[in-house]
Image (cartoon, rainbow, N blue to C red):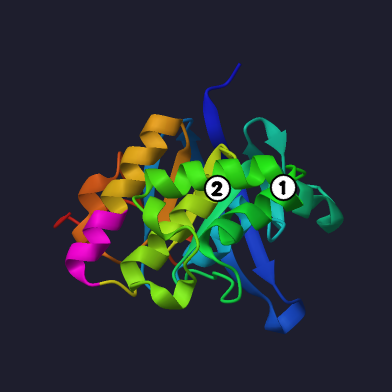
Amino acid sequence: MSDAAIELKGLTKTYGTGALAFQALKGIDLTVKQGEFMMLVGPSGSGKTTLLSILGCVLSPTDGEAYLFGEKLHGRRESDLPDLRLSYIGFIFQGHNLIPALNLEDNVAFPLELRGYSRHDALTEAREVLTAVGLADKLKRHPEDLSGGQRQRVAIARALAGKPPLILADEPTAALDAQTGQQVTELLKKLSTERGHTVVVVTHDNRIFHYADRTVHIEDGLLVPPPENH
């Protein structure tokens, strides 16, 4: 049995057709081991977001092979993708994407209920992960009551809740100051290691590169060797 969380072979993604076609990914070969904390780095327009969207079962690849914990992603109908997302993936976004009208425990519990958890079990898990990120005293607060760093901690708790095997983080420190960004990344690394998640972080933030087990560089739709100054 493979110990790979992610296996990509000759992965391509093309938007549009004919003269207007744009190839965002041009043949990606990548393996990410289960439990690995990997950072995906590259300039704007390099293909990072497209690759993350395929790993997150938001987009289907145009060609090549993609496997998530041995499950084939290529050749799937788009209608299959939401169930795969719910089963395998927790997302952390730059903008938190919290629901303003819900308190913190409901922000974390709501996605679990979508995955079939009972209300009681969803709230129990929500309280557990919010406690793990240091917010046990704020369960009934709303997102507007929190600092940016605290909101990102809620986003981490929501992503980790229910222990999805893969965590995908899109620029999770972009809206944070340097110290808070490092604290949030350190927390994500610690909790994902303790709970056994595989993590892929897309980032421009070279202040957090040292938390990665491995840094993978993408440029113009291809994986490339890291710059010599890294």
For this orientation, the residue located farthest to the top is 1
Quadrant hosting residue 14: bottom right
SS for tag 1? Answer: helix
Q: Please check the rendered image and state whether residue 178 is part of the magenta-colored stretch, yes or no.
A: yes
| Mark 2 neighbour density, 10 Å: few (under 14) some (14–19) many (20 or more) | many
- The crowding category of the residue bearing disc 1, from other C-alpha atoms within 10 Å (few below 14, some 14 to 19, many at least 20), is few
Quick check: 204 left or right of 192?
left
Magenta segment boundaries in residue numbering: 177-184
Q: Inspect the image, locate mark 2, and give the three-letter code of the amino acid beneath it.
A: Ala
Above or below: residue 195 compared with residue 26: above
The residue pinned by badge 2 equals 126
Q: Quadrant of residue 192?
A: top left
Identify the residue shown where x is 47% and y is 67%.
141
Q: Position of residue 163 (x, y in %)?
A: 56, 37
Q: Was residue 168 drawn as part of the magenta stretch in this picture?
A: no
Name the quadrant of the C terminus.
Answer: bottom left
Q: Quadrant of the N terminus?
A: top right
Q: Main secondary structure of the magenta part?
A: helix
Front residue of this view, candidates 214 and 20: 214
Tell me if 173 is positioned left or right of 178 in this view.
right
Q: Which residue is mark 1?
A: 119
Q: Could you tell which of marks 1 and 2 lies nearer the N-terminus?
A: 1
Report the amino acid beneath label 1: Arg
**Residue 23 placement (x, y as % from top left):** 61, 69
* Residue at 62 percent of width and 53 percent of height: 109
Whether residue 173 is visible:
no
Q: Is residue 107 left or right of residue 145?
A: right
